[in-house]
Image: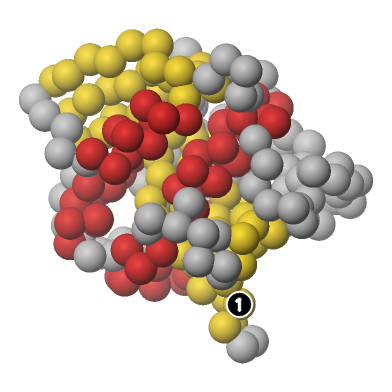
Amino acid sequence: MDVTVQIARGLEVGRLATLHNGAGVRLRPIRPDDAPGLIAFCGRLSPRTAYQRFFTVRRLRPEDAVALATVDGHDRLAVVAARDIGQATELVGVARYGLGGGDTTPDVGLVVEDAWQGLGLGTMLLAEIMRAGEERGFSTFHAEVLAENDRMLRLLARYAEIVQRTVDRGVITVLFRSAPGSRASATPLSSRSTRCWGSPAGRRTRPPRGASAP
């Protein structure tokens, strides 16, 4: 059962989650100081995973990492899955949404490090980013997914209600919302969890499009 907590100004409280293999991760809002972790995270992605998310294989530039780690908490928001390694923290998954000036629905992107795929983390990240969007007044989302990215397409088909699918040159744009009777805001992540979203902040600009942003 989720436990709602009061989040003091500047304090980021995460959600503890237990994966299928028993490993624990913390899902929390992204922070500006996560930029180096994003670079390391993207560097560990296999070429196939990187291509399916970025639509190309390239390294994440420092300036891009800073932009991706800096969100406004309303129109641009991201959650990371982090694990502690001694005194250090390693990112193993990222989900985000961004609302562009011409968009009516937020654009969702999600990526999980290869070694952590198939453990339920993608499902948790999708539920968490949809939960956060719903708490900010968004009921419908969209994602741009390569037609070959079966894993992401299956994830959306299983855990969301697909409103519309369109295909353009190998890219599927999926319009989706929480499935009836299983709202993202009611999806449990573990038996030991706390809400990780504070109050919405101001509004800024749109991040890189679709499933390409880590």
Which quarter of the image is occupied by the N terminus?
top right
Identify residue type, mark 1.
Asp
Density class for disc 1 (Cα within 10 Å; few <14, some 14-19, many ≥20) is few
Task: Name the spot of residue 50 as percent of width and height, x first.
Answer: 24, 56
Query: Disc count in the image?
Result: 1
| Nearer the observer, 150 or 63 | 150
Residue 213, visible in the rendered structure: yes
- In terms of depth relative to the viewer, which is nearer, 118 or 90? 118
Is 209 situated left or right of 18 in this image? Answer: left
x 47%, y 25%: residue: 160
Q: Residue at x 45, y 57 (%)?
A: 119
Where is 70 relative to 131, above or below?
A: below
* Residue sitting at x 43%, y 34%: 108
Q: Secondary structure at mark 1?
A: strand
Extreme residue toward the front, this view: 21
Image position, residue 181 (x, y; %): 62, 18
| Colouring rule applied to residues | secondary structure
Residue 141 falls left or right of residue 192? left
Residue at the bottom extreme of this rendering: 86
Q: At which x and y percent is residue 117?
A: 37, 58
Mark 1 lies on residue: 84
> Taking 2 as reference, is 23 left or right?
left
Residue 15 appears in the rendering: no
Please report the residue visible at 47 percent of the width from the left and 30 percent of the height from the top. Answer: 159
Relative to 57, residue 181 above or below? above
* Left or right of residue 138: residue 142: left
Displayed quadrant of residue 210? top left
